[in-house]
Image (cartoon, rainbow, N blue to C red):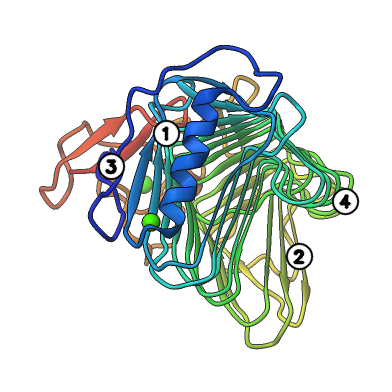
Amino acid sequence: MFTVCRCRFAVAVVVVGLVLVAGCNRNGPPPELRAIQDLLDEAAGNGRADTIRLPAGTYLLTEPLTYTSDEGFGLCIIGAGAGRTILDGQDRTQLLRLKSTVAGSDFTIRHVEFRNGRSAQYGGALQVENDAAATRVDSCAFRDSRAGVLGGGVHAVAFDGEVTFTDCVFTGNTSADDAGGLNASSLRGAVTLTGNRFEDNHAGTMTLARNLLHDNTTDNVVGGIAVATSVGTLGIFHNTLDANAAADGGGISIYCDQAGARTEVSNNIIWRGTPNGFTSSGAVSPVVAYSDVQDGTGEPWFGTGCIDADPLFVNAVGGDYTLTSGSPCIDAGDPASPPDPDGTVADMGAFHFPQRAEGATADGRRWTQMGGLGPGGREVEN
Ligand SMILES: [Ca+2]
Ligand SMILES: [Ca+2]
């Protein structure tokens, strides 16, 4: 699906076929890691866009790979696939740190697995600060990493740039403070998180669209989705949350610092949040619409189209959060939302229940069931 490099400029450096040497070098990082760091250093100042390809293999890091640049050109880092190209911090080092302050320096990271990262502060596995350009992370896995402050798996922040995570897996990450899986924010840009999977991350996670979050736990606030904004607009659509627990805000928690902030929360399933499914604080009191929220009935935020009924997942215990045919969430989303790929009214939650055979939609378009992140796959139009 993601085979086309999104660098804004022509690819200038392509490195393939690095020879991997297993184990560590007592006198420093092994040669293949030194070679990668050399490429990053060169890319940071060569006045053009670069792509660095990481061949399949397990890279045992003893110090982070770093890239700090003030040139307005992009950087792509592309692996052979999560599970094939693995950066392993051996429980002692952060894995990758990227930083830029200028426009045009888009970062793309794709098909890489990050695991066993450690950071005393931010981003146990990956730390990205891209103030004025886009950060896009596609089809990566973040596992078993830990941060001392924020973003056990990933810490990705921007002032004006957009931050996008698509089809990533976050599992077993921990932070001592907040955001066990992912901390992503942009002061004036957009944060878009689509099709990601969050499992067993400890502390909060933040997400927006079509994410599945279950069994996340924190001792602080927010087990599932934590979103904060000062004056921006937040949209939280088509997420499925189940069995997320926190001291407060087990499912979704929204904080709006100033009255100018806007929020839209609709088409979600928020089930078994402990102690509650939804909380908000700050200058704005968001209203949830067209969502299935356990114990939401009577709450001031329980708005138009909301229901409080068992979503009838196929097998929540087994991690299958697709809907059974009797689910009250089917066709219960906002009628004004884009229709499901099968042409019917939007279902609540991350996975829609297909009511028509593949290839047949009401308006003649075709759609195909894809093997996606959920056990039932996701559906895409084509
Ligand atoms: Ca460059
Ligand atoms: Ca539907």
Secondary element type, mark 4: loop
Residue underneath mark 3: 380
Which amino acid, by three-letter code, is at mark 4? Answer: Asn
Placement of 363 over or under 37, stated as above or below: below
Q: Are marks 3 and 4 in contact (CB under 8 Å)?
A: no
Residue 16, image x, y percentages: 32, 28
Mark 2 residue type: Glu
Q: Are marks 2 and 1 in contact (CB under 8 Å)?
A: no
Q: Position of residue 79 (x, y in %)?
A: 41, 31
Q: Which sits in the foreground, 68 or 226?
A: 68
| Quarter of the figure that contains the N terminus | top left
Q: CA distance from mark 3 to mark 4?
A: 37 Å
Which residue has dot 2 on it? 299
Eyeballing the image, is 42 above or below 3?
A: below
Q: Residue at x 64, y 39 (%)?
A: 64
Nearer-N-terminus badge (3/1): 1
Q: Which residue is nearer to you in this view: 291 or 58?
A: 58
